[in-house]
Image (cartoon, coloured by chain):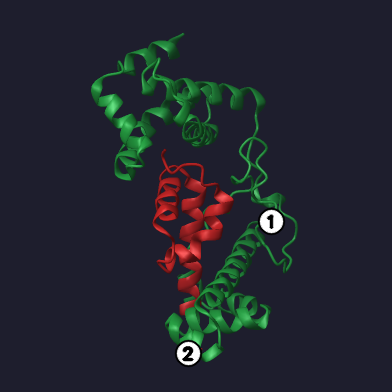
Chain colours: A red, B green
Amino acid sequence: MIAADMTCRELVGWVTDYREGMLPVYQRVRFAAHLHYCGSCRRYITQMRQTIRALALLRGS
Amino acid sequence: MLLTDLIQAEAECCSPAARELLDRLCAGDEERFRQFVLRHGVTMRRVAAMVTGNSTLAEDAVQETWLAVMKGLPGFAGRSSFRTWVFRILVNRARTLASREWRSIPVSQLPAPSQAADPLAHRFDHPEHPGHWTIMPLPEWGRSPEQDVLNGEVRDLVAKAIAVLPTAQREVITLRDVEGWPAAEVCNVCGLSEVHQRVLLHRARTRVRAALEAWYLERRR
């Protein structure tokens, strides 16, 4: 059965694990599949990336 | 009637190729799935826009269709072609949306930002698809936050957002994301397990992102 039905709420909870490479294979597939069709979650991921980059720019300030 | 013509024109018979795709989707072949979504998305959007007369609703219809497809895929009996089945769902969703004018709640209806432990509470109370976005992430943060930081605009905001975090979260996000230290070193320095460190980082980032979103939202009001 396809790794379907990851909800947006679930995905948001997995974001950090995903970035750290800590998602189990099964969850990683579900995560990536969800992003293929969910524009809202793609936007969230982008915003998280932007947030982290903004934090890095505080370095040394 | 024009729509059924369109669907039939695009429908494939349940050919061996279609059946193979279906089997691969059911087997979790992600790349095939991705290609399928890409290939059909344009047409789906066009059909949905035709039904709803509205590109925003069309986008909603397409997204909700994929949700329904994911849910219904194990039960798909193959009586029609796969494409026909998908587009039938799409047309029904589009019609429902057009008639009901259900719209995702705009971010402007969010309550004033607070330091809630879970800034995303109540963002996923979709009436039909529990767990999916109701109040979606604010679109177009505009110029990227990096540029704003360089201009000094967002610097104070992000610093403030970090400052009001619980201590442990503040420590981890400062060392990991501001200072750029690797996870193992932060664990050693802070006396944390790897899992605990990651949980703290996750919560801290979620809050800082929420603070940024609220800030962009305020600027629009």
The residue nearer to you, when weighing B178 against B33, is B33
User: Neighbour class for label 2 at 10 Å: few (<14), some, many (≥20)?
Assistant: few
Residue B25 sits in quarter: top left
Where is residue B212 drawn, in percent x and y?
Answer: 59, 66
Would you say B20 lies left or right of B208 here?
A: left
User: Neighbour class for label 1 at 10 Å: few (<14), some, many (≥20)?
Assistant: few
Q: Is residue B188 above or below residue A19?
A: below
The residue nearer to you, when weighing A54 against B33, is B33
In the rendered view of the protein, which quadrant contains the C terminus of chain B?
bottom right
Chain letter behind tag 2: A
Q: Is residue B20 visible?
A: yes
Would you say B82 lies left or right of B100 here?
A: left
Where is residue A55 drawn, in percent x and y?
Answer: 50, 76
**Residue highlighted by disc 2:** A60
Same chain letter for marks 1 and 2: no
Q: Is residue B15 above or below residue B150?
A: above
Q: What residue do we see at 53% from left, 80% from top?
A: B193
Q: Is residue A27 above or below residue B169?
A: above
**Residue highlighted by disc 1:** B121
Q: Is residue B189 above or below residue B62?
A: below
Q: Mark 1 belongs to which amino acid?
A: Ala
